[in-house]
Image (cartoon, helix red, strand yellow):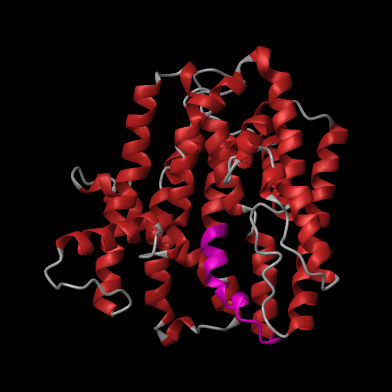
Amino acid sequence: MVEQAKISNVNPGKRVIYYDVLNILAAINVVWIHFGNEVHWYDGSRVWMWCASIQVLAYWAVPVFFMLTGATLMNYQAKYDTMTFFKRRMLRGIIPYLIWGTFMLALQIKRGNIHIPLDGDIRKMLFIILDIFVNNRMESIYWFFLVLFGIYLSMPILTLLTKSENRTVLDYTVAVGALTVSILPFCYRMLQTYCYLDGSGWNSALQLPILGSYLIYPVLGYWASTHNFSTVERGICYTAAILCAILRYTGLVYLCKRDGSTNQLYFDYLSFPSLFLALGVFVFIRYLFAERIVCKEKTAKFLAAISGCSLGVYLIHNIVLNKIAGIAFFAIYSLQWYFFWPLICYLFCLVIVYAVRKIPLLKYLFP
């Protein structure tokens, strides 16, 4: 769901193959996550356990999308000026959000889920519509775009971290950011949750202010794409990722069983189990394609074409999911629903997006 950088950090002028691979895998896993939404309603059933495993296995996808945004865009000034950057972001992010947000709003109004009063008060009506878009009340999964907009606005500042003379500052930002945004706050909440302790929660004033919202991920992504990981460092990343996945699964199951309802502790993209899992996947795919897999030119072009459809897949996959959920053939709540149909849904969306992008006027729906 990110625009592939045309200039590689290593090979200027060439696409970075592992960016495309990560983009494709992340899109597939986002679709998979939404097939397992029953994890949010704990009942202790076998279906819930399936959904819990899906959440753990696929949870890295959204953080990796944000990491790719940093990896591909933080050094944008090496390719074009800031005005061009914002024009591209407008076409790539803001316009699709407005177009598809409007479509989803109309759909929600038709279904009766959203009501906009038509009592003649134009100011009130316009403010309600504005509030819907600002707070993303027409389609829950579009929250991703609002985070992206904040990241885009931060890029002219974040790009300073890409300068060679600021490498130490970048390392510091990643280390302190991970500590104060992901590790300490989550450990504090774990202590509260597991020990039934009262308190107001972690004080956000103690976090690194320049990494507000989800900015830890684009900075981490750029750092991970430019840092030369030793064999030992890679091993640490992979081990941390596996341990964090185990912690999240066992913790999620334990707390939900203990409380008899879905405990929200582990549903936090900023938590260290999420961050280190995403970092482990990112580094693994990077070195897998850098050292062991050589892509031919045709294969690289194919991956680039598929990767370019990821944003479109994200935009429409929930519509497709909801449609097929009402068809008996797809056997919702079955094993194949959770572990087979997500891939078919992704491929179906991919075909739609790829075909529409070939039509001159309609291609702007999926930039």
In depth, the one of 288 and 257 nearer the eye is 257
Q: Is residue 115 above or below residue 136?
A: below
Q: Indicate left or right for 44 with 113 as reference.
A: right
Q: Residue furthest top?
A: 165
Can I make out residue 321 in this image? yes
Q: Is residue 288 above or below residue 158?
A: below
Q: Quadrant for residue 336, please give it.
A: bottom right
Q: Position of residue 203 (x, y in %)?
A: 71, 51
In magenta segment, residue 195: no
Residue sitting at x 58%, y 78%: 38
Rendered-image quadrant of the C terminus: top left
Q: Indicate left or right for 196 with 299 as reference.
A: right
Residue sitting at x 22%, y 46%: 359
Q: How many marks?
A: 0
In magenta segment, residue 39: yes
Q: Indicate left or right for 84 with 179 as reference.
A: left
Q: Residue furthest right?
A: 232
In depth, the one of 165 and 348 nearer the eye is 165
- Classified by dominant secondary structure, the portion drawn in magenta counts as helix
Residue sitting at x 46%, y 61%: 141
Q: Quadrant for residue 108, please give it.
A: bottom left
Q: Position of residue 222 (x, y in %)?
A: 62, 31
Q: Position of residue 306 (x, y in %)?
A: 45, 46
Q: Residue furthest left?
A: 120
In depth, the one of 20 and 104 nearer the eye is 104
Q: Which residues are magenta?
A: 29-45
Q: Indicate left or right for 165 with 80 as reference.
A: right
Residue sitting at x 57%, y 46%: 213
Can I make out residue 296 in this image? no
